[in-house]
Image (tube, helix red, strand yellow):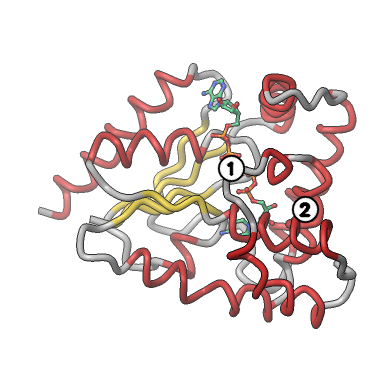
């Protein structure tokens, strides 16, 4: 079984994807981490995020980035990731890794922006997770604080809105709900409620397909 979880920044898609992977015993890939690793590689080792050529070259540096590096989650890296992810060359360079993960024998859960539309269009179940920009900004501020990276609500809200616009407006694999995806708005839900709702939606989809 392949489960595609898409949605905008800090909507809770990663939390939900990890919980679905645990619940259904599937491997999980956070595809945003690939784009963040390219961004961190450029931030740390040099490269102009305004240049597609340099961003594509930085894709080779992904393996050198430690996936537990706290800086992957920083706002500056988020912002560079959002910019370089608009380049078709960057998306092409990272495509195969995601497709082959989705094609694994055990099935998989992947979360990102284009899983249901581009990476795994034939996924067994697709969720599109959203929440209002204000709720997402509050969650991201709390998350950054817990990681020892204090930030200002207003700045994070501006960044989230800018990323929403860039991710949805780009030509290459824009953030969009797949036609056959279930919409899950977590604005008014606790983490536990959101996870329970997601499991329920996936189970209903599996039953409907059986
Ligand atoms: N339903 C929820 N209610 C409150 N906080 C949440 C909820 N879902 C996720 N969070 C918290 O919000 C932050 C962002 O969630 P995350 O799953 O990383 O989002 P995304 O992967 O969409 O960026 C995390 O700190 C997470 O614990
Ligand atoms: N499948 C994906 C995943 C992420 N991304 C980009 O990578 C950036 C970081 O993704 P993320 O999922 O780690 O970000 P958050 O939603 O956790 O803030 C996003 O702003 C997207 O622009 C993408 O284009 N396609």
Q: Give above or below for 33 relative to 53.
A: above
Measuring from the top left, give residue 49's x and y in whole percent. Answer: 85, 67
User: Which quadrant of the frame does ligand 1 lie within?
Assistant: top right
Image coords of residue 113 (percent x, y)? 57, 56
Residue 140 is left or right of residue 186, and the answer is right
Counting from the top left corner in percent of width and height, residue 73 is at 69, 41
Residue shown at the point (37%, 72%) measured from the top left: 100
Viewer-proximal residue among 95 and 172: 95
Name the residue tied to disc 1.
68
Q: Secondary structure at mark 1?
A: loop
Q: Which residue is mark 2?
A: 165
68 shown above or below 134: below
Q: Residue at x 27, y 48 (%)?
A: 26
Locate residue 207 relative to residue 154 in the image: left or right: left
In the rendered view, would you say 131 is above or below 208?
Answer: above
Label 2: element kind: helix
Tell me the quarter of the image containing the N terminus: bottom left
Along the viewing direction, whichever of 205 and 81 lies nearer the viewer = 81
Instruction: Tell me how many marks there are.
Output: 2
Q: Are marks 1 and 2 in contact (CB under 8 Å)?
A: no
């Amino acid at each position: 079984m392949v489960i595609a979880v898409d949605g905008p920044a800090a909507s809770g898609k990663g939390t939900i994807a990890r919980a679905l992977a645990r619940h259904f015993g599937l491997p999980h890939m956070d595809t945003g981490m690939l784009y963040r690793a390219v961004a961190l590689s450029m931030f740390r080792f040099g490269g102009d995020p305004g240049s597609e050529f340099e961003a594509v070259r930085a894709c080779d540096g992904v393996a050198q980035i430690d996936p537990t590096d706290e800086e992957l989650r920083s706002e500056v890296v988020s912002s560079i990731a959002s910019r370089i992810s608009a380049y078709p060359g960057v998306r092409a360079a990272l495509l195969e890794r995601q497709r082959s993960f989705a094609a694994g024998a055990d099935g998989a859960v992947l979360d990102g922006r284009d899983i249901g539309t581009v990476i795994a269009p034939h996924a067994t179940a697709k969720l599109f997770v959203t929440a209002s920009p204000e709720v997402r900004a509050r969650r991201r501020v709390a998350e950054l604080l817990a990681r020892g990276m204090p930030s200002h609500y207003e700045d994070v809200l501006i960044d989230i809105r800018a990323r929403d616009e860039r991710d949805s407006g780009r030509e290459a694999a824009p953030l969009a709900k797949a036609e056959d995806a279930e919409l899950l708005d977590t604005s008014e839900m606790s983490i536990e409620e959101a996870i329970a709702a997601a499991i329920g939606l996936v189970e209903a989809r599996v039953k409907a397909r059986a």
